[in-house]
Amino acid sequence: MNQFEFGLNYYFRDDFGFVSSYGRQFSSDGNANIWTVGLTYRVALPLWPEGGK
């Protein structure tokens, strides 16, 4: 099986974005198109309270 994939990521802000990709899969069982789309949201949490040393 061989596969080709192309993708695009676009962030509207630092924490919110859009992702998409297109792939083509070649195999002896048959060829297939693979489409993926999604939204991402990043959440960052501190490892320890601020001021603690």
Image: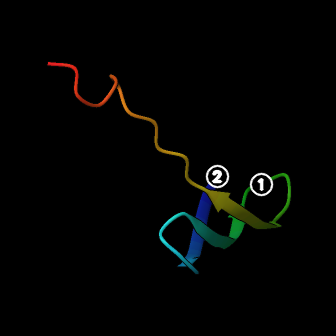
Tell me which amino acid carries mark 1: Ser
Q: Is residue 28 left or right of residue 15?
A: right
Residue sitting at 85 percent across and 60 percent down? 30
**Mark 1: secondary structure:** loop
Q: Position of residue 41 (x, y in %)?
A: 63, 57
Residues at discs 1 and 2 in contact (Cβ within 8 Å): yes
Give the camera-side residue of 45 and 20. Answer: 45
Q: How does the figure colour the protein chain or chains?
A: rainbow
Q: Position of residue 48 (x, y in %)?
A: 33, 22
Q: Is residue 4 left or right of residue 23?
A: left
Q: Position of residue 46 (x, y in %)?
A: 38, 33
- Cα separation, mark 1 vs mark 2, equals 7 Å
Rendered view: 45 above or below 33: above
Tell me which amino acid carries mark 2: Met
What residue does disc 2 label? 1
Give the camera-side residue of 25 and 39. Answer: 39
Q: Earlier in the sequence, mark 1 or mark 2?
A: 2
Q: Residue furthest left?
A: 53
Q: Residues within 10 Å of mark 1 (few under 14, many from 20)?
A: few
Q: Which mark is residue 4?
A: none
Give the camera-side residue of 45 and 2. Answer: 45
**Mark 2: secondary structure:** loop
User: Which label sits in the foreground, 1 or 2?
Assistant: 2
Question: Picture quarter containing residue 12?
Answer: bottom right
Give the camera-side residue of 52 and 5. Answer: 52
Q: Is residue 21 left or right of residue 53?
A: right
Residue sitting at 61 percent across and 67 percent down? 16
Residue sitting at 61 percent across and 62 percent down? 3
Question: Picture quarter containing residue 49?
Answer: top left
What residue does disc 1 label? 28
Q: Quadrant of the C terminus?
A: top left
